[in-house]
Structures are given as C-alpha cells and as structure tokens.
Amino acid sequence: MSKPIKRIGILTGGGDCPGINAVIRAVVKTAIRDHKWECVGILDGFQGLIENRMRPLEWTSASNILTRGGTILGTSNKANPAKYAVGMDAEGKPIFKDVREQAYANYEDNGLDALVVIGGDGTMSCAAGMIELGARCVGVPKTIDNDLMHTHVTFGFQTAVEIATEALDRVHTTAASHHRILLVELMGRNAGWLTLHAGLASGSDVILIPEIPYTLDRICAACEDRKKHGKYFTIIAISEGAHPIDGKQTISRVVTDSHEAIRLGGVATLLSVELEEATGIESRAVVLGHVQRGGTPCAADRVLATRFGHEATELLAKGKYNELVVIQEGQLRSVPISSVANQQRLVDPKGDLVNIARSVGTSMGD
Ligand code: F6P
C-alpha cells in the first residue's frame, strides 16, 4: 500500500500561456475542498524545486486568479533537473549537471507526496526524470503550440488562436487599402497548429506551416492569381518554424543555458523582402511574438483548464500516478507522462484541416 497523499506540490514549467492560473485554482480548490490536502506552490518551475523555493497555497491564494494571464508561481523554460546549467566552461559554453538528487531531496524534505506538473513536452520530460527517482507526478498539458502527443488540445491554444486571428483580421483592412502583401508571423515552434487554425479562421490567402515546406514561386503565383480576380492584396499567415523546401528554419536566438536552446523567429521579415522583389508588390511583415502568450484566457480555455486541473487532482486521489491528463474524442483520459516526453504532435500535411484549407482556395505555399 503506497503512502497516502496529504500534501502536494504544484509547479508550472516552460513558456507561460493563458489558463495556467485557472489550472492552479482548480487543483488547489479540489485538493482542499474534496480531499483536505495541503498545497504548496513551487516557484519558477523546476528551478524552484532545485533551489528549494516554495510557498503555501491556501484557498485564498486560489481566489481571483481564474481570469489572470501568466502564472502566479512563475516559470522557467531552462531548468531541467537532469540537465541543469551550473556554470560556463573556459570557452563560454554551459556546463550541464544532473541535479535530480538535489531536487528529489527538496521534494522529500518539504513533505510532498506528489507533484502536479503543468507544462509542455519539455516539462513532461523533466517530470519523467523525477519519476525515475521515485517522485509521484501528474501532468497537465499546457502550450499555445498545441503540439503535445496524445491530446487533441492543450489549454492556452484556443486563446492564442483568438489573439492571432484578431491580428490577421486587423491587417486585412490595411493590406487591402494599400494593395500590399502582409505577412503575420505566429509562434508554434515546429508545429503549425496555431497558424493553421488562425489562418483558417481569418480567411488568410496563404498559410505557411513547418510541416509543408514552401517555394517562393508558389506563393508568388498565389499573389498573382489574386490580382487576376481583382484582389491587389494578400494576407499570409506564417509559422515561425516555416521554411522553404530547399532551406532551413530561421533561428532568432540560441539560449545556451536552456536544455532546448533554439528559439525560432524572423522568417516573415526575410520572406517579405523576397516577395516584394519577386512580385513588385509592396510587402510588410508583422511578428506577433509574446502577445500570443499574454493576457486573460478565453472562456473555452478557462473551462478546459478547470477540467484538466480537477482531473489531475482526481488522478492523484485514485492513486493513478505518473499520468498526463489528455482530451481524446472530447473525453478526459490519461496517458503515461513518459509517452509524451520530448515528442511533438505535428500537423498532418494530408490531414482534413489542410485539405479543407486547400478546398476553400488557400495556398499552402507548395
Ligand atoms: O512553446 C511556446 C513558445 O511560445 C513557442 O511557440 C516559441 O517558439 C517559444 O515558446 C518562445 O520561447 P521564449 O519565450 O523563450 O522566447
């Protein structure tokens, strides 16, 4: 018989997104009201577990946070206990060390019986590393990228789609007035979900995603084709991870002390120059950036986050440890955390949504 749960730790890892506080609220309130457990917030993701920085989370700490963006606990998309940067070598390269024993000692010393880990694939791989040492975890799928394996949707995604769609809607009128090509670069890393959904929702003329490499010629052809139909402007929704068929992704920075060092960005600006030269149509690029991750969650994400947080707590209460809460066919289910660690769910280039986009006349740049 395993030790009963009396006290749980909650941490949020990776890039923030709208809805994290709604998950924290659901976990804390369900844990206190239904199970009489104590809750502890671990600050700045796994960084706080390594450095032993925590604070109590009472009922009142979980009040008034449902609609608040960001995370009241802070986060880090660098600190992985299994590969933690402890300094720099003589060449300025980070020295990584496995500090999981230290993190595990803090888990034990604080009397934690389990961890609720809110994050994406990187955070789940950190959790998998702690599970190997004996920590009991439950995961909640968070990311605007919507790229976590085995779940149809992650919380934060729908809010980001709303924000990106509004941006695309807004550039529509200015592009039309000036007869320009307008590119809007959206986040998502190697997955095109955000761009595909926002592109469809806004009726973008061209949608460029990492899963479907583009050619300049095909995009120019789409712009020219529009001219024949009396449309002298073109809206392009482009993922930060999109790339030409014969080229690589555009890297905006390398965060050397992060276990996932590459940050993408800048492709829209490069492509707008190429398009202007090739078509003679004046072009502009907008990089939406972290606006997509900020602010209040939409209603759908508030509901999803609350369902996820409640379900995570119930999994712990049932002794179903080391599982990630997921949504499949509209139903809450769970899968082993180890099955999603360090993997990405990408758009199927031959899938329904891409085919529908093509059917309604959208160019996918190929
Ligand atoms: O994973 C979420 C995300 O916003 C990605 O879409 C983006 O590529 C990355 O994080 C940006 O990371 P940072 O906040 O470190 O710039």
Image: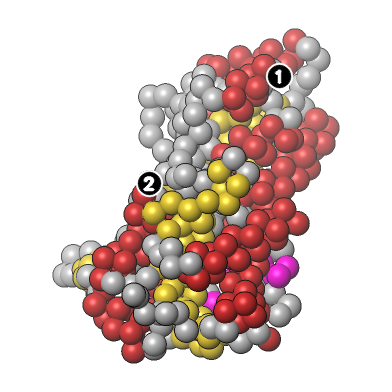
Q: Quadrant of the N terminus?
A: bottom left
Identify the secondary structure beneath mark 2.
loop
Left or right side of 86 for 246? right
Looking at the picture, which amino acid does disc 1 mark? Val
Residue identifier under label 1: 360
* Any part of residue 216 in sight: no
Distance between the alpha carbons at the discs numbered 2 and 1: 32 Å
Counting from the top left corner in percent of width and height, residue 169 is at: 77, 39
Left or right side of 81 for 311? right
Report the front residue among 185 and 56.
Answer: 56
**Residue positioned 43% across, 68% down in the render:** 319
Coloring scheme of the render? secondary structure
Counting from the top left corner in percent of width and height, residue 264 is at: 45, 47
Residue identifier under label 2: 343
Report the front residue among 247 and 342.
Answer: 342
Is 159 rendered above or below residue 102?
Answer: above
**Residue positioned 83% across, 32% down in the render:** 177
Q: Residues within 10 Å of mark 1 (few under 14, many from 20)?
A: few
Extreme-left residue of the structure: 90
